[in-house]
Image: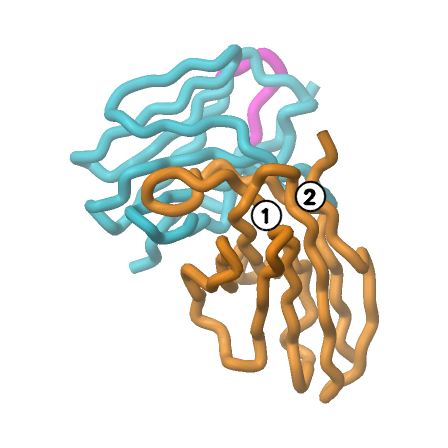
Chain colours: A orange, B cyan
């Protein structure tokens, strides 16, 4: 069974640009969550989607957005990039149980974004 | 007060010893608790989940939950150098998603 696939793995952007990251969940997993990981802040929750609807949202500015497609694949977008957006962006998929995702997350390898 | 707190470490133990990793959480209505392991340069992977007070054992790993005191711990018996990693505690309540602690770095020396 294929794992969670994230693309691209590495990217370099300059301030003010925008970026789109993609995530393909494990087959059968309908929940997709996105996290930002930095050395100082650890894993911070961005948003969660299932059934093409945003179910939960973390405390990030509106420059961060996402969406989920009917095949459960998800994308996140960051507009007007800032230096502080440099981070590892992790996507995780999960099955759905009563109360939302099961909590048993399977992470992709991440997309490492560097903003210059 | 942070939602999920862990000592950042590093926690250093010799090979063969028991490593004890602790986590406290602030929200009493939290229902589900998880331990993830993250090797340097890799993404987190789930190693244990626990939902009820008490102990849950899986191989060399034992998760302990005490809801009254709002803490979760992970014991690793017979620690191996391959256990050297950052261990992330995560908490879930209701329909919300996981909230992670910042992790404890464990170093197991041969």
Q: Residue at x 56, y 11 (%)?
A: B78
Query: Which circle's residue, 2 or 1, is located before the other in the chain?
Result: 2
Left of B81 or right of it: where is B106? left
* Marking on residue B64: none
Count of numbered marks:
2
Q: Position of residue B62 (x, y in %)?
A: 42, 18
* Badges 2 and 1, same chain: yes
Task: State the CA–CA distance, disc 2 to disc 1.
Answer: 7 Å
Q: Position of residue B107 (x, y in %)?
A: 62, 31
Q: Which stretch is magenta?
A: B12-18
Classify 10 Å Cα crowding around label 2: few (below 14), some (14-19), many (20 and above).
Answer: many
Above or below, B14 relative to A66: above
Q: Quadrant of the C terminus of chain B?
A: top right
Q: Residue at x 50, y 39 (%)?
A: A95
Above or below, B89 relative to A37: above
Q: Chain of mark 1?
A: A
Q: Nearer the viewer, residue B11 or B88?
A: B88
Kindly tell me whether residue B89 is visible in this rendering: no
Q: Position of residue B25 (x, y in %)?
A: 30, 46
Q: Chain of mark 2?
A: A
Q: Secondary structure at mark 1?
A: strand
Kindly tell me whether residue A77 is visible in this rendering: yes
Residue with the mark numbered 1:
A92
Classify 10 Å Cα crowding around label 1: few (below 14), some (14-19), many (20 and above).
Answer: many
Q: Nearer the viewer, residue B14 or A53?
A: A53
User: Is the residue under label 1 in contact with that under label 2 (CB below 8 Å)?
Assistant: yes
Q: Quadrant of the N terminus of chain B?
A: bottom left
Residue with the mark numbered 2:
A4
Left of B37 or right of it: where is B94? left
């Amino acid at each position: 069974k294929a794992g969670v696939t994230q693309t691209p793995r590495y990217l370099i952007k300059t301030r003010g640009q925008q970026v789109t990251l993609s995530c393909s969940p494990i087959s059968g997993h309908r929940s997709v969550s996105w996290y930002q990981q930095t050395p100082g802040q650890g894993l911070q929750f961005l948003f969660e989607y299932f059934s093409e609807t945003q179910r939960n949202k973390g405390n990030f500015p509106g420059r961060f957005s996402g969406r989920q497609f009917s095949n459960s694949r998800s994308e996140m977008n960051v507009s007007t990039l800032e230096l502080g957006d440099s981070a590892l962006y992790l996507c995780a998929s999960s099955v759905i149980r009563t109360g939302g995702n099961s909590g048993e997350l399977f992470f992709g390898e991440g997309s490492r974004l560097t903003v210059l | 007060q942070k939602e999920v707190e862990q000592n950042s470490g590093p926690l250093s133990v010799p090979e063969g010893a028991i490593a004890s990793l602790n986590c406290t959480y602030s929200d009493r209505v939290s229902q589900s608790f998880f331990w993830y392991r993250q090797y340097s340069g890799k993404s987190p992977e789930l190693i244990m989940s626990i939902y009820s007070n008490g102990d849950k054992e899986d191989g060399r790993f034992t998760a302990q939950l005490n809801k009254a005191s709002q803490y979760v711990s992970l014991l690793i018996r017979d620690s191996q150098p391959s256990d050297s990693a950052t261990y992330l505690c995560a908490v879930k309540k209701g329909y919300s998603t996981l909230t992670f602690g910042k992790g404890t770095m464990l170093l197991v020396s041969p």
